[in-house]
């Protein structure tokens, strides 16, 4: 009985630390990084590279998410979307979170340096600093353009994957970066539109709070147009072929439909659907890149 209770408590504790890592966010990060690895390889990615690069990137991404939770714990406490996280509920302390993040991130960087290459390690460290420090601490509470500028960190995973395989950064890797960079603003602004009252209560200068709904809806549309155009660049540069182009057009057309509807006939429910679709869009677009690469 005592042993069973001990294991149960250990499992509950582990779940709390796992929540700090934002598994759903990290899974998309890892997915795009792995796609970057496969796109960089003429054939299959070496198992050693796939294993250690994926593990290292995932660990550092989880550490960055934990730092984000640490810095924003007071903000998280007043937002319905985040108030159930371990820090606002008092289930973990700031010191525990900081130590956990340090161990997790340090382990990830060590794996990348020891088993992959120094370039990937340094790029991953720069991405960590960009998200956990530059975006979370400086940009997010300071400017409504936080998502645009801070999006550079979120766009790095496929570049990290590419560097893990090749030891360099190519133009094709930068195209992958550009796609996610263009995707980030309409993705997050859709969320900000239907959560604007929570962001206002938390004192965060998100675009709907500082410039209003109409201005934000226009920018969702404009950035979606930019995204659709950018998503065609892999075909234009002959990185990908016709199967990818067809996929990009269909996926982009659906996303553009949502963006137009948000601009013309907005509702919170529509913004929620657009936000959810944006995740499907990015995942499917990168999957299409990979399938085209293998075809």
Image (cartoon, rainbow, N blue to C red):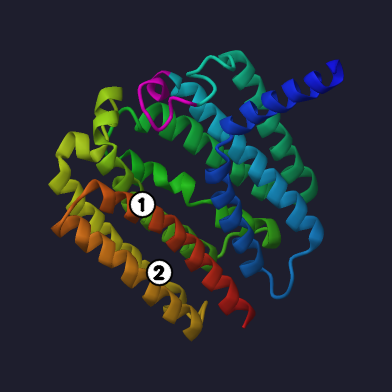
> Magenta region: which residues?
74-84
Foreground of the two, 42 or 11: 11
Q: Is 95 located above or below residue 232 in the figure?
A: above
Foreground of the two, 93 or 15: 15
User: Which residue in the structure is indicated by mark 2?
Assistant: 231
Residue at x-position 34% and y-position 63%: 227
User: Which residue in the structure is indicated by mark 1?
Assistant: 275
Q: Quadrant of the C terminus?
A: bottom right
Where is residue 28? Give x, y as percent. Answer: 54, 52
Is 79 contained in the magenta span? Answer: yes
Q: Secondary structure at mark 1?
A: helix
112 left or right of 168 in image: right
3D distance between C-alphas at marks 1 and 2: 18 Å
Foreground of the two, 238 or 73: 73
Q: Quadrant of the N terminus?
A: top right
Secondary structure mostly taken by the magenta-highlighted segment of the chain: loop
Where is residue 162? Give x, y as percent. Answer: 62, 60
Q: Is 208 located above or below residue 77 in the figure?
A: below
Q: Are marks 1 and 2 in contact (CB under 8 Å)?
A: no
Where is residue 159? Give x, y as percent. Answer: 56, 56
Residue at x-position 29% and y-position 37%: 195
Residue at x-position 54% and y-position 27%: 67
Residue 145 is marked as none
- Dot 2 surroundings within 10 Å: few (below 14), some, or many (20 or more)? many
């Amino acid at each position: 009985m005592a042993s069973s209770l001990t294991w149960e408590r250990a499992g509950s504790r582990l779940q709390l630390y796992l929540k700090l890592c934002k598994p759903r966010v990290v899974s998309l990060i890892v997915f795009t990084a792995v796609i970057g690895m496969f796109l960089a390889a003429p054939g299959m990615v070496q198992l050693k590279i796939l294993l250690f690069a994926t593990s290292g990137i995932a660990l550092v991404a989880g550490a960055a998410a934990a730092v984000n939770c640490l810095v924003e714990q007071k903000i998280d406490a007043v937002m319905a979307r985040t108030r159930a996280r371990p820090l606002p509920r008092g289930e973990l302390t700031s010191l525990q979170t900081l130590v956990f993040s340090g161990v997790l991130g340090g382990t990830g960087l060590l794996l990348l340096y020891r088993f992959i290459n120094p370039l990937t390690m340094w790029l991953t460290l720069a991405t960590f600093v960009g998200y956990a420090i530059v975006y979370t601490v400086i940009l997010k509470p300071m400017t409504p353009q936080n998502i645009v500028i801070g999006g550079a960190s979120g766009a790095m995973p496929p570049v990290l994957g590419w560097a893990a395989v090749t030891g360099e950064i190519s133009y094709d890797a930068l195209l992958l970066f550009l796609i996610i960079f263009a995707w980030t603003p309409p993705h997050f602004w859709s969320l900000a539109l239907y959560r604007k009252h929570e962001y206002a209560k938390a004192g965060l200068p998100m675009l709907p709070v500082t410039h209003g709904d109409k201005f934000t809806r226009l920018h969702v549309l404009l950035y979606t147009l930019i995204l659709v155009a950018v998503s065609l660049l892999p075909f234009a540069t002959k990185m990908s072929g016709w199967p990818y182009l067809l996929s990009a057009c269909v996926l982009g057309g659906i996303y553009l439909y949502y963006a137009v509807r948000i601009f013309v006939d907005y509702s919170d429910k529509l913004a929620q659907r657009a936000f959810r679709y944006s995740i499907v869009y990015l995942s499917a677009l990168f999957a299409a890149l990979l399938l085209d690469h293998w075809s």
